[in-house]
Image (tube, helix red, strand yellow):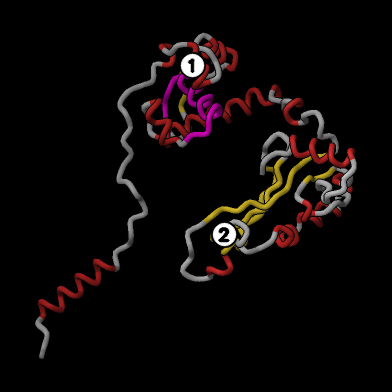
Amino acid sequence: MKRSQSADDDDEVLLLWLMRPASLYYREYTLVPNFRSDILGMSDEESEDQFRFTVSELPLLVRHMKLPNVVRTREGARTNSLEALSVCLRRLAYPQRWFDKAVMFGRAPSTLCHIFYFVVEFIEKNLGDMIYFDEERVEPAGIEGVWGFIDGIVRPICRPSEGQQAMYNGHKRVHALQFETVVTPDGHISRLFGPVDGRRHDLFMLNESGFKDVLKNNSNFHNNLICGDPVYGCTNVFCCPYKGCHLDATQQELNKVMSAIRVSV
């Protein structure tokens, strides 16, 4: 039986509809409240909670940092110096999505991002020579000779349709990706390697990353140790807790001290 021309046309329309490119956006637009935050109208308690400074201290910071009265970013966003500083301080005070900050400041997430980077670049350019590390935080007492902590971290993923065995982590009993992370005593991630298959061992990641060779070939790292699980062993660049049931008092005390100061990876 011969198909009609209209039926063929309908099939072509359906085929074109199925082949249409999928939308890359999960929302058509972002709803931004139509207001401006009254920063100077906050109480000191609220201001310290949001920005780590009181209301009276914010204008002093603006004046001493010599921020321009009218801030205009390279993208064309425009605001005043007090709001610009508040956006920057809020971002540094608490890790939060720009989308969530839009509710507080009444500005689009992209605009807040542009304002934040304007202030950061302004500080680096004009006050960079006054920025320094807090030595008491970077080098806390009690860990002399240990500059980092290494461990493998497991990040669960959805069960893949293919390669399930390769991604399955038997220790955590989940399908996952793994990363090798080195964290310094101040809590900063100084090195990140990955991802690798969830079934892989920590030693596999160490060998694949080449990190062990980097440490061995650079004498600056010798006897400046990285603390990790017993699987990493004890060398001139790695150290680990003593293991076993028959430990003397000194070994037990060392394990106790290292356990107390170890930074979570």
Of the two numbered discs 2 and 1 in the rendering, the one whose residue sits closer to the viewer: 2
**Residue at the location (69% across, 61% down)?**
201
Which callout, 2 or 1, points at the residue further toward the start of the chain? 1
Q: Is residue 158 left or right of residue 66?
A: left
Would residue 223 be counted in the magenta stretch? no
Which quarter of the rendered picture does the N terminus lie within? Answer: bottom left
User: Which span is picked out in magenta?
Assistant: 76-96
Residue situated furthest front in the rendering: 245
Residue 63, position as x, y percentages in the image:
55, 12
Q: Nearer the viewer, residue 117 or 165?
A: 165
When the figure is inspected, residue 26 is found, relative to residue 161, above or below; the finding is: above
What residue lies at 66% left-to-right and 63% top-to-bottom? 200
CA–CA distance in space, label 2 to label 1 = 45 Å
Q: Position of residue 146 (x, y in %)?
A: 81, 39
Question: Could you say which disc has been placed on residue 47 in the image?
Answer: 1
- The amino acid pointed to by label 1 is Ser
The image's mark for residue 173 is 2
- Report the residue at 74% width, 35% height from top: 260
Q: Residues within 10 Å of mark 1 (few under 14, many from 20)?
A: many
**Residue kind at label 2, given as amino acid type:** Arg
Secondary structure of residue under mark 1? helix
